[in-house]
Image (tube, grey):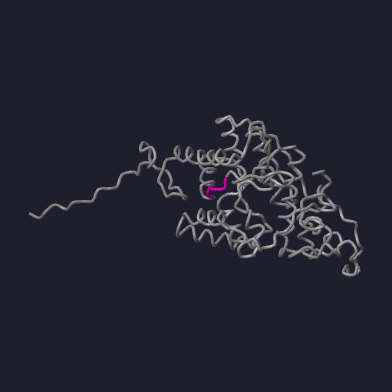
Amino acid sequence: MGEAEVKPKKAGPVQCSICSQRRAALKRPKTLEQICRECFYAVFEEEIHRVIVDNQLFKPGERIAIGASGGKDSTVLAYVLSELNRRHNYGLDLFLLSVDEGITGYRDDSLETVKRNEIQYGLPLKVVSYKDLYGWTMDEIVKMIGLKNNCTFCGVFRRQALDRGAAMLKVDKLATGHNADDIAETVLLNILRGDIARLSRCTSIITGEDGPIPRCKPFKYTYEKEIVMYAYFKRLDYFSTECIYSPNAYRGFAREFIKDLERIRPRAILDIIRSGEKFRISTSAKMPEQGTCERCGYISSQKWCKACVLLEGLNRGLPKLGIGRTRGLNNGLECDTKQSNGVKNIQSKQCGTLDF
């Protein structure tokens, strides 16, 4: 009689590698640990708390604006900061701050999500718009310049709009949802562009301390995939559609490269950030001197800030005037009428009138 065949035993459910009590529900992208939902929530929130405490991001009594777009990053940031503020008694007054760029079918929908978050988290909301600040919407800008350089306009205008909105709220700091993936992409982009000034500060967890409103990044070491998982398992209300005007943005190519690296080696994202932190700028490298825009008072290394230069081009019918390197552009902006190609010179609306 032949030996009975021994059937291999079926592997049982994988236990959580942290608590060893519950079944694992996910594999952490950052560490590849298999853990349960409850432990994932705990380590995710604790890591962010440690980043806040170790880097002294906030002080008791401060007013903090959270840059809120309605997307996964800002929605999770608003939720987690609200939870940690209560749990650890940070003593912060939290606000939501949104920018309406004027993109029909995208920003109008995402702002509805932010308005729901305002009610869900009990946080006051302030919305500032490009139309009110600059006299233009992104729809109008894209209609004039096309899709090639629209992200340049939007990035410059949004950064300044957030500062102006934060000034209206009289906050002490602005917290943004920039995650580890975003920062790794920025390090790579600044290397590719040879942008020494931005490379030297893009990994800083607090920036703009010499400007109107300091900014901080509580998600500096938090992976985008884990933010998505947290939002999904917590069933948070967020808007997931990409901007209709940014399918060909240069940053998108860097993002794909970072994702490829992450698939091969998950720690690649943190390694790029650590490398960026260790960069030292040569003493012989000439850095731009920080000043203020003569026109609107915003921080600038030129006579006019980038937003005022771009607005001047739009209002004079010369939208490419401020695209690319602007060194030397400022000297001839106010008196140069020969380039207008017959377009009547329009008195530009300066980019805001707040006193910084």
Q: Residue at x 35, y 41 (%)?
A: 15
Q: Is residue 53 above or below residue 206?
A: above
Number of marks in the rendered image: 0
Magenta segment range? 219-223
Q: Residue at x 66, y 57 (%)?
A: 198
Camera-nearest residue between 314 and 300:
300
Q: Position of residue 113 (x, y in %)?
A: 65, 42
Camera-nearest residue between 272 and 264:
272
Q: Is residue 274 inside the magenta stretch? A: no
Q: Main secondary structure of the magenta part?
A: loop
Q: Position of residue 213 (x, y in %)?
A: 72, 43
**In this image, 138 relative to 180: left or right?**
right
Say which quadrant the C terminus sits in.
top right
The residue positioned farthest toward the left in the image shown: 1
Q: Is residue 254 above or below residue 219?
A: below
Camera-nearest residue between 241 and 313:
313
Q: Residue at x 47, y 50 (%)?
A: 30
Q: Position of residue 167 (x, y in %)?
A: 76, 41
Say which quadrant the N terminus sits in.
bottom left
Q: Quadrant of residue 124?
A: top right
